[in-house]
């Protein structure tokens, strides 16, 4: 889909702070996070709804791998949400921490780089 912001991130047209990437999925930091280091797990193919991802178990395995890694390196709880109508591209939100400490305020490049360095699996 040409106007999908997530497809543009996958294509490299919009820069992102990648946490994990394989041939089917991409995990990157949300620049308007609700929590410190909130990330999005997306399929690289444009699929509108999470429930339509062809191998849903594989998709959730990627989300679980990243969430377990966050717990290992920081010893904090990790929540996940399947929510959002703003971007019509399947995405799972991974929200480290126990509360919404940032409330959707834009993160600075320095914050994003710090989180990327701490949590990256690449």
Image (cartoon, rainbow, N blue to C red):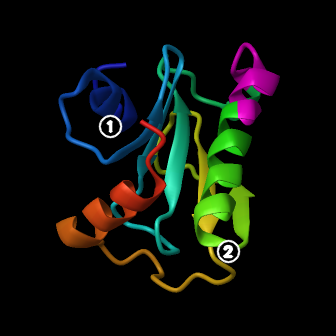
**Residue 81 seen in the current view:** yes
Of callouts 1 and 2, which one flags the residue occurring earlier in the amino acid sequence? 1
Give residue 73's quadrant in the image: bottom right
Considering the image in quadrants, where does the N terminus appear?
top left
Secondary structure character of the magenta stretch overall: helix
Give residue 81's quadrant in the image: bottom right
Q: Residue at position x 49%, y 14% from top?
A: 23
Q: Nearer the viewer, residue 43 or 5?
A: 43
Label annotation for residue 5: 1
Q: Residue at position x 47%, y 21% from top?
A: 44
Considering the image in quadrants, where does the C terminus appear?
top left
> x%, y% of residue 4?
35, 31
Q: Residue at position x 75%, y 16% from top?
A: 55
Q: Magenta region: which residues?
A: 52-61
> x%, y% of residue 109?
19, 65
- Separation of residues labelled 1 and 2 (CA atoms): 30 Å
Numbered disc 1: secondary structure: helix
Q: Is 47 a magenta residue? A: no
Label annotation for residue 96: none
**Residue 108 seen in the current view:** no
Q: Nearer the viewer, residue 7 or 67?
A: 67
Q: Is residue 55 left or right of residue 7?
A: right
**Residue denoted by label 2:** 76
Whether residue 43 is situated above or below residue 116 in the rendered picture: above
């Amino acid at each position: 889909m040409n106007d999908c912001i997530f497809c543009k991130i996958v294509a490299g047209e919009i820069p992102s702070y990648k946490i994990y990437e394989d041939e089917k999925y991409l995990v990157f930091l949300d620049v308007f996070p609700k929590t410190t280091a909130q990330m999005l797990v997306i399929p690289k193919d444009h699929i509108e709804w999470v429930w339509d991802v062809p191998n849903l178990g594989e998709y959730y395995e990627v989300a679980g791998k990243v969430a377990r890694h966050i717990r290992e390196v920081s010893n904090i709880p990790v929540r996940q949400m399947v929510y959002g109508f703003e971007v019509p591209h399947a995405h799972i939100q991974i929200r480290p921490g126990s509360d919404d400490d940032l409330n959707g305020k834009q993160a600075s490049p320095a914050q994003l780089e710090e989180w990327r360095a701490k949590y990256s699996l690449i």
